[in-house]
Image (cartoon, rainbow, N blue to C red):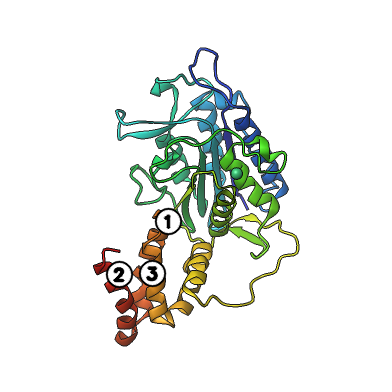
Amino acid sequence: MASRAVVVGVGTYADDSGIHGYPTIEASARAYGEALDRDPRWGTAARSPVLDREEVRTADGVMRALHEAAAAGEGPQDTLLVVYVGHGAYWQDVPGGQVHFALGSSRVNEPWTWLSAWYVYRAIRKSKAGLKVLIADCCYSSMLPHLGPESALPGILGTRYQGTCVLTAVGGNVHNAWAGACPNLPAPLDSCTTFSGHLLNVLAQGMPEHPDDLTLGALRAGIDESMQECGVHHTPRMLLNDASEAAPLFTNHAKGRRPRTRAPVTVDEWVRELLLNGERSLPDLMRVPDLAGRVVVRLKAGDEQSRELARRVDGRAGELLPDPVDFVRYWGEIEPAMLGGG
Ligand SMILES: [Zn+2]
């Protein structure tokens, strides 16, 4: 196994930089390091994945560490995880329009002192690791594109086995991520940024109804539910490009797990199952074509992530419903909703 993680937390800036530092940023980076260290899937790395203050001061320091981690990925079993916590900005008037990540030496309104997401994407995409995941906890992370082949960022794309995924602190029209801490989280996570604190709390607590590994889908659902419970946060976003919701990323630390014994039955249960585990059990759903149609209609009415999932389910309907009678039952649920403007 050559899974590698790089955690870039930039919370300290020069006094004359015009950029406000937050202690929550460095606290979050340390907490990611501790979570990875505790996790048998990740805990074997020879060096800490958390870059030190000198490394995160310059693009050279970050990119050298990133290229080294990306080069360690050898094949399908490997994962490359890149975490960025800090300030993000978006400049339209640079080549292509890009999200930029702040570094220790960045200055406000001087894009050339920031690290363009283009360089970060380029390094991640070149890795031979089977699964490539970027977690971005910064403002304008909502503007980050897919990592995979349909990315708005052109460039070489390495071997993909399990695909790519981008998880961001904010999504939709919300561009500002909250660097302040969430007081509802247990210590020491109540000293992290809101999004990272909630994410790390899901890792620390685990999810009782899930198996030994926390998948991308489970992680997303866990963060969503935990942030919604607080009632004050913006919703994060996960762009699963060609990765499956069922791809495992972390170990599930929940005590006394009780795996679900009953297969999903209702539309609500199926929507949740698909959001958690992707299309793994899609053939079971397609055995009841009209129910499958209603599930797709529900997903199409949801957020960006749900609509993307609806497209993937719909894309496989033809192959999974070879009998025209079944396909008509499936499509009979979808067509009226589409005509109704849904
Ligand atoms: Zn909260």
Q: Is residue 225 left or right of residue 159?
A: right
Residue at the image position 53 percent from the left and 59 percent from the top: 217
Cα gap from disc 2 to disc 1, whole angstroms: 19 Å
Mark 2 to mark 3 CA distance (whole Å)? 10 Å
Q: Residues within 10 Å of mark 1 (few under 14, many from 20)?
A: some
Label 2 neighbour load within 10 Å: few <14, some 14-19, many 20+: some
Q: Is mark 1 within 8 Å of ligand 1?
A: no
Camera-side residue: 219 or 246?
A: 219
Location of residue 260 in the rendering, given as x and y in whole percent from the top left corner: 64, 72
Residue 202 in the image: above or below residue 295: above
- Residue at mark 1: 305
- Give the structural element (helix, strand or loop) at label 3: helix
* Tally of numbered tags: 3
Choose between 23 and 235: the one closer to the eye. Answer: 235
Q: Which of disc 3 and disc 2 is earlier in sequence?
A: 3
The tag earlier along the polypeptide, 3 or 1, is 3
Residue type of the residue flagged with mark 2:
Ala
Residue 2 coordinates in the image, percent (x, y): 61, 49
Rendered location of residue 242, percent (x, y): 43, 57
Q: Quadrant of residue 26?
A: top right
Q: Name the N-terminal-most of marks 2 and 1.
A: 1
Residue 265 location (% of width, % of height): 52, 78
User: Which amino acid does the dot numbered 3 rest on?
Assistant: Val
Q: Tell me the SS state at disc 1.
A: helix
Is 81 left or right of 111, judged from the image as shown?
A: right
Q: Marks 3/1: CA distance?
A: 13 Å
Residue 117, above or below 270: above
Outermost residue to the top: 16
In the image, which disc is placed on residue 296? 3
Circle 3 residues within 10 Å: few <14, some 14–19, many ≥20: many
From the image, tell me which residue sits under label 2: 337
